[in-house]
Image (tube, rainbow, N blue to C red):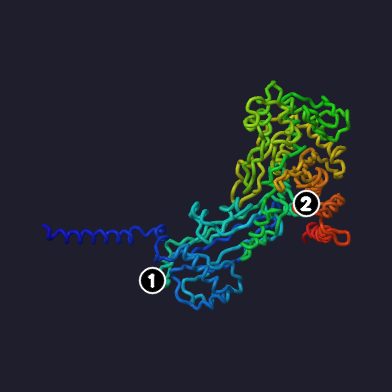
Amino acid sequence: MRQFLLFITIISVGVLFLSRLFYLQVYNSSAHNLYEDNAIRKVYDYPKRGFVYDRNGQLLVANQPSYDVMVIPREVEPLDTIEFCNLLKINKEQFIKTYKKAYRHSPRLPYVFLSHLSKEDYAVLQEKMRKFQGFYIQKRSLRYYETTIGANVLGDIGEVNNKTIKKDPYYIMGDLIGKQGVEASYEKTLRGIKGIKFIQKDRFNRNIGPYKDGKFDTIPAQGKDIKITIDAKLQAYGELLMQNKRGGVIAIEPSSGEILAMVAAPTYNPNILVGRDRSKNFTKLYNDSIAKPLFNRSLQGVYEPGSPFKLMNALIGLQEGVITADESVTCYRGYKYGNRFMKCHCNSGTRNNLIAGIQRSCNAYFATAYRKILDKESNASKGIDNWSKHVKSFGLGQFLNNDLFVGQKGRIPDRAYYKHIYPKTFYSTYTISNAIGQGEVATTPIQLANMAAAIANRGFYYTPHIIKNIEGEKLKEQFTKPKKTTIDKAHFEPVIEGMLQVYKKGTAASLQVKDIDICGKTGTVENFAIIDSTRTQLTDHSIFLAFAPKDNPQIAIAVFVENGYWGSRFAGKVASLMIEKHIKGHITRTDLEEWLLKHSLENEYAKPYSGEPFKINGQTALQIVEEQEYYRLKRLLKTINKPKN
């Protein structure tokens, strides 16, 4: 029996191997296994990304052809390195460094050896590629921006990293993906689906034709075109007005929640993040820790909202029945509580009702209203939770569930927030700064613009969004279904009348635009920074909130200008001009326009980092640059306003 044991074992193992080979060759030749088969070369066919249009059909983002030199390290044979490097316009050190990097990534998988060849270089190289085994050229589309605006809106595309590849197996090394803005938010819509061809190789590693006559090949599906809600002309105008300033501007259509403009200043030309110089230019933008051009202040900037937040306290006070539109509060140039004094600009002895309180931005009126809200049931702990609930119903203090790539929650405190500071006793005076939009309250520009839209709509809003239309798809319900606030419709009218009076004879009276009833609210917020370990007060921030017209509003807007002195000085002018631009299509308040183009805030931003400025003939270097910049901006303005043929 033992003499047959070895024979039986050999026969059994042989049958097992033959069965497995038969199964793999005949029954299991699926496309899935082809990806792991070293005898099959995978060639990807990349689709064109979808185009991006503005709300009026203006093309913003298109495509341009790009060619990448790919390498499969284990297939590389001895070659004339000098000739190859000359063709690619690189040196031998770069060749060796990139080849080693590709080999470490994977000896058998394709790797981008050199990206973004020009058409001319591609034409020369293509004729000689047969000489360089293991290398091949892969065609794909790069973005081409038909505009110089909206970098923070449109975003950009770049190579995927290992983290993305592990998370989503659709991507392989060298693939491009949306990195920011619309490109990132709608990546799966815009990218399409790449196709693939399986090429059979012989034992000498030579291509011998399509595997199984192309049975498992797939063709690419082109990305879908999208139309975004941005008005390109309004966006360009907002960016122009915000040049040499830092801050954020958000304009929303109240009747739909569509974002008309989203300005983050400073900004940059989106075209610099395309092509071979993308990495170098991105690094420059990323390392600018002072101006922070990659930081989207309109979505990520968290600021105390200042006086525009008084509108919220007025609405809550009316809803809770602790104030009426007619009752007055006497102001003695501010509000005294304990040993502290919250001053304002009212004359001593001024009596303000709700409308006058908004018009004059009276701190005494709103401090009184805030305390009445919290002390309604003689329990400030319950009162602040109720107050917080009302505020959050306007979308403040939370993510708005929108389709924007980045954002911040802001901060709307409640009793739990204050528990660690005041664990036992809690009184309304402890948080009195919340009455005037300072203290612990913090919002983003988009949240404040959304609040303006909710007031304009008399109690509801649509989630702010950037997508207007996707080819062949319906808009998601989250963008078409209105969200109700906790405030009854009737309470909005006196508040809106107060906002109208801000323009008629209040803190924004100098910003009126003929034939447009604008409802607004100015804001001035204290600005502190830690410099050399010391809390230092810098120039106040300028904030403005508005909507127009008063009836059937077409636009709601929030403007934050860092170090802008006071509400009507910078932010109010920007808001008024953008409102007029949107509603009329042209500007009559050219005096405001001229003023904004001439005045820069770069000197304010330089203060914490430098001493007295050096002067030439009585002018600082900044003033000389500003004068040159003014004429450049005037030329740019003519371009923006130039009608199309």
Amino acid type, residue under disc 2 in the picture:
Lys
Please, which residue is most extreme toward the front here? Answer: 533
**Residue 335 in view of the camera:** yes
Distance of mark 2 from mark 1, alpha carbons? Answer: 70 Å
Report whether 4 appears left or right of 569: left
Q: Decide: marks 2, 1 in contact (CB < 8 A)?
A: no
Residue at image x 65%, y 31%?
Answer: 421
Foreground pick, 87 / 590: 87
Report whether 251 appears left or right of 118: right
Residue 455: x and y in percent read: 74, 36
Foreground pick, 262 / 279: 279
Foreground pick, 463 / 591: 591
Instruction: Specify the quadrant of the image occupied by residue 191.
Output: bottom right
Report whether 462 appears left or right of 207: right
Give the vertical position of 22 relative to 245 (above or below).
below
Residue at image x 88%, y 62%?
Answer: 617
Instruction: Quadrant for the C terminus, please.
Output: bottom right
Q: Are there few (<14), some (14-19), or many (20+) residues within 10 Å of tag 2?
A: few
**Residue 242 in view of the camera:** no
Report the residue marked by disc 2. 607
- Identify the element where label 1 is drawn: loop
Instruction: Quadrant for the N terminus, please.
Output: bottom left
Residue 295: x and y in percent read: 67, 51
- For marks 2 and 1, give the one nearer the viewer: 2
Report the residue marked by disc 1. 202
Instruction: Specify the quadrant of the image occupied by residue 63.
Output: bottom right
